Image (cartoon, helix red, strand yellow):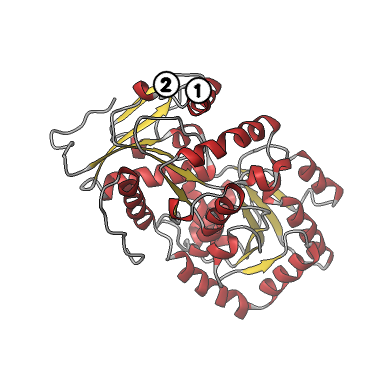
Amino acid sequence: MAERGPEAHSADRLRVVLDAGPAVHQSAGLARYTERLASTLWQKHSDRIDLTLFYNSHSGHRLPSSLESIPSRTVRLGQYSWRLGALACQLLRAPLLERRLPAGEVYHATEHLLPWLARPTVLTVHDLIFERFPQHHTYTNRAFLRVAMPLFVRRADAIIAVSQHTKRDLLDMYGTAPEKVCVVDEGIDEYFRPAAEKDIRRAQEQHSIRRPYLLMVGTLEPRKNHALAFRALARLKAEGWPHCLVIVGGSGWLFDSAQRQVETLQLTDDVIFAGRAPDADLPALYSGADCFLMPSLYEGFGFPVLEAMACGAPVVCSRASSLPDIAGDAARFIEPMDDEGMAETVRQVLSDPNIADNMRRSGARQAARFRWQRAALESVHVYSIAAGWKAQPPSRRA
């Protein structure tokens, strides 16, 4: 456990234990949410909360360097022992894991895993895709979440939904009381901004990318709807457009059929699977793209849409789940099953510089609305609600 300074604990501050597990064991959106929220809480709000991190160290992985200075405590259980233990706590209504956690007045579960505890709890709900699109989850994960999530949602003292769409799903599917759910938009980092041409060229060479290109960023899994993008690309190539499609993201699950479609559509030379890219490379990759695509069937939030906008890439995304809320009027929208419509929309962006320039300007304004400092401030307010502390809601301009 990391050491606290002599001034660390104060009766005027709320002691919060935050599950940092996603930042340790996962990648993509869950990891980024947990790491950036914890880091911002520690750097900007230590006058209001006394933060301790907690995670299951079953994999041997460690906290990212940005979180190493925050007090932390670990438990070492197998991955399934920890997950099933959290569910067993809820089923038995017994705080079986309480003694393994650091002391605190509020526990924040940053992913969909909440043990029964003898203290107030906050649960972040990112999405309910396993309910909306069960075929896009593995059987084991789907079975666990369908039993566990209704319990976690019911037993949490307060819920953070990462988008208005996720809140609507909670209300519609679980009958959750509206006053229990606080929407806290996630943020994007300030290093997402248009990159210099030399940095774009360096990233292009490092990842073996040719220009011009279209770009997708995200884990390779069915809900990202890569298959639609492949079919739209095939239409564009048939018209003579020179663009390739660059896919940045790590392997997920159930992606084989979409990947086979690349060969079926004879796009082997025009679809570049670049794998996961370091965060430091992403601004240049976004900046170099003539258009960013996100035809997802479902997104709890949708970080890449805002990151692309902040870096000056015009965005074409699906009119599905949270994406219209996140993208506002700065994106062009397509139906998530219409490859002809997607090809036409991308064609308009590529062929008309005025459209692309207007999208870049409106995208920059839209992305500027989402910052981690505000997300952290609003999360502190949720902690106060859960703990029964009197607190004024933060200004939405914070």
User: Between 32 and 237, which is closer to the camera in this rendering?
Assistant: 32
| Residue sticking out furthest to the left | 6
**Few, some or many residues within 10 Å of mark 2 (<14, 14–19, 20+):** some
| Residue 127, horizontal then vertical, whole percent | 57, 48
- Real-space CA distance between mark 2 and mark 1, rounded to the nearest whole angstrom: 8 Å
Based on the displayed image, in which of its 4 quarters is residue 67 positioned? top left
Mark 2 and mark 1 lie on one chain; the one further toward the N terminus is 1
Q: Residue at x 40, y 42 (%)?
A: 157
| Residue 5, horizontal then vertical, whole percent | 17, 34
Q: Amino acid type of disc 2? A: Leu
| Residue 82, horizontal then vertical, whole percent | 50, 23
Check whether the beta carbons of the residues at disc 2 and disc 1 lie within 8 A of each other: yes
Q: Residue at x 60, y 46 (%)?
A: 128
User: Between 162 and 266, which is closer to the camera in this rendering?
Assistant: 162
Is 341 on the left-hand or right-hand side of 298?
A: right
Is 307 on the left-hand or right-hand side of 145?
A: left
* Image position of 389 with respect to 80: above or below: below
Task: Confirm whether residue 119 shows in the render.
Answer: yes
Which numbered mark, 2 or 1, is in the foreground of this view?
2
Pointer 1 residue? 85
Total marks in image: 2
Which image quarter holds the N terminus?
top left
Classify mark 2: helix, strand or loop.
loop
* Image position of 314 with respect to 47: above or below: below
Q: Amino acid type of disc 1? A: Gly
Classify mark 1: helix, strand or loop.
helix
User: Between 123 and 226, which is closer to the camera in this rendering?
Assistant: 123
Pointer 2 residue? 96
